[in-house]
Image: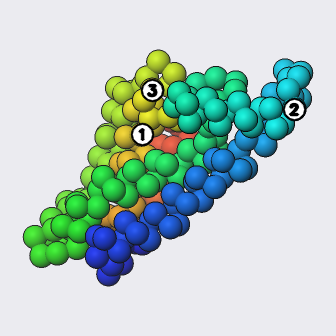
Amino acid sequence: FALGFLTGRQFVKERFKRIVIPLVVGTFLVVPVQLYYAQFMVRGYSKSYLEFYQTILYLFFRYGYFGTGIETLYWAHLWFLGYLFGYSLIVLPLFLYWRRGKGQGFIQKLSVFLEKPGAIFLLAVPLILAKAGLRGRLAGRTFLIIDDWGNFFFYLFLFVYGFLIFSNDKIRLAIERHRVVALIAGIIASAVY
């Protein structure tokens, strides 16, 4: 959707301004305050904020420590911005291809297939495989990619699905036609899982 009629280079530049700059600013200016507050309030942390901030900067710039302990720089709740930028770069060639002739043909064929009764639910298979088959030892508690492949690929598939859904009205209509069945399946799956 954000790709619009931008070239690949323009898209990367735009994503950098809208995603990477806020991620870096937030990681260095907003998150450390939250991390310090959590350490101070929960664990009775004894260092001042200035000492804490100097420590996390030193450990990051000297040793590359990031999200590996109590006194390390971390992106915390901004993890999704790092993932989103990574997704934007990884799938950009595919999205650019899908905007053109043969790529548009693929999306058209896919939309015809997904119009068949129940076919839209096959899009859940990669999501299930990502979550079940790629769970790391930390299983998404850190959102640092290294131990988070299940979440990384789960959200990558959702990112690609979003592009496909907004590229073709037939796919959106197929989703809409199956909304009641999807709601019931979602309720049952949530109750079981």
The answer to whether marks 3 and 2 mark residues whose Cβ atoms lie closer than 8 Å is no
Quadrant of the rendered structure where residue 95 is? bottom left
Badge 3 density bin: few <14, some 14–19, many ≥20, Cα 10 Å: some
CA gap between label 3 and label 2 equals 31 Å
Taking the image as shown, residue 31 lies to the left or right of residue 65, namely: right
Q: Secondary structure at mark 2?
A: loop
Q: Position of residue 115 (x, y in %)?
A: 26, 63
Helix, strand or loop at mark 1: helix
Q: Amino acid at mark 1?
A: Phe
Which residue bears the numbered disc 3? Answer: 147
Residue drawn at (32%, 48%) of the image = 123
**Viewer-nearest residue: 92 or 58:** 58
Left/right placement of residue 35 relative to residue 143 reads: right
**Residue 39 visible, this angle:** yes
Left or right of residue 77: residue 88: left
Residue for badge 1: 152
Using the rendered image of the protein, determine whether residue 169 is visible from the camera's viewpoint.
no
Camera-near label (3 vs 2) is: 2
Which residue is label 2 attached to? 48
Q: In the image, is residue 181 above or below residue 15?
A: above
Residue 3 vertical placement versus 23 (above, below)? below
